[in-house]
């Protein structure tokens, strides 16, 4: 989120940011982020284990928009102008899928139907009692723990992979 809040990407996200990044440089950034997201090498290319799928931690819920906590500054900047973010997030997911596949792992992205245009998780997927308490907008709050509906959608995306109906 921080990178995209300060930079535009030529042909993908052009909002008038002070920095315009080439698509090639953005792709390199995505590959670098994907490398950093890999699990420990112990899990790579393990023929002695069942196939391994990795599901990401969900994007923060859109309830962060109500927070004034600086932790969410970049996400709030992006949500205010989401132009091109879907394509940017898809490019990152593509880099994650390729990077994980090279290590014998399967990356299954967050179900797209759970996301807002800005790449945040829709508020109705947030677990009960989460978010920011009324009158405590300067606190971090909890925007990361999702509910059973979110879990059901993740399972619906995982089951075809588990049953061999989807080849990755």
Image: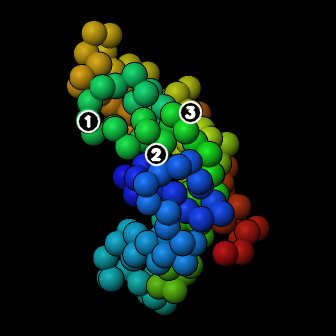
Please state which of residues 144 and 54 is positioned toward the viewer in this rendering: 144
Mark 2 residue crowding within 10 angstroms, few (<14) / some (14–19) / many (20+): some
Q: Which residue is painted at 33% across and 31% down in the image?
A: 142
Question: Which label sits on residue 59?
Answer: 2
Q: Earlier in the sequence, mark 1 or mark 3?
A: 1
Q: Are marks 1 and 3 in contact (CB under 8 Å)?
A: no
Residue 152 is left or right of residue 18, and the answer is right
Residue visible at 62% across and 41% down?
Answer: 117
Q: Quadrant of the C terminus?
A: bottom right
Q: Is residue 52 visible?
A: no
Q: Residue at x 24, y 23 (%)?
A: 138
Horizontal placement of 67 versus 12: left or right?
A: left
Q: Report x, y in % for residue 38.
A: 39, 73
Instruction: Give the image location of residue 44, x and y in percent.
Output: 41, 84
- Dot 2 lies on which element? loop
Is residue 71 placed above or below 104 in the rendered structure? Answer: above
Q: Residue furthest right?
A: 165
Placement of 63 over or under 94, stated as above or below: above
Asked if residue 163 can be seen in this view, the reply is yes
Q: Secondary structure at mark 1?
A: helix
């Amino acid at each position: 989120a921080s990178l995209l809040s300060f930079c535009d990407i030529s042909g993908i996200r052009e909002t008038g940011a002070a920095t315009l990044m080439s698509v090639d440089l953005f792709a390199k950034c995505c590959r670098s982020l994907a490398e950093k997201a890999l699990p420990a090498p112990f899990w790579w290319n393990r023929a002695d284990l069942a196939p391994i799928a990795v599901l990401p931690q969900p994007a923060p819920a859109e309830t962060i928009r109500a927070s004034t906590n600086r932790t969410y500054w970049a996400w709030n900047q992006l949500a205010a102008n989401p132009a091109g973010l879907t394509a940017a997030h898809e490019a990152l997911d593509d880099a994650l899928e390729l990077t994980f596949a090279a290590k014998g792992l399967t990356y299954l992205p967050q179900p797209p139907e759970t996301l807002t245009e800005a790449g945040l998780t829709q508020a109705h997927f947030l677990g009960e009692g989460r978010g920011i308490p009324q009158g405590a907008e300067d606190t971090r709050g909890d925007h990361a723990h999702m509910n059973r509906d979110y879990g059901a959608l993740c399972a619906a995306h995982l089951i075809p992979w588990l049953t061999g109906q989807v080849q990755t």
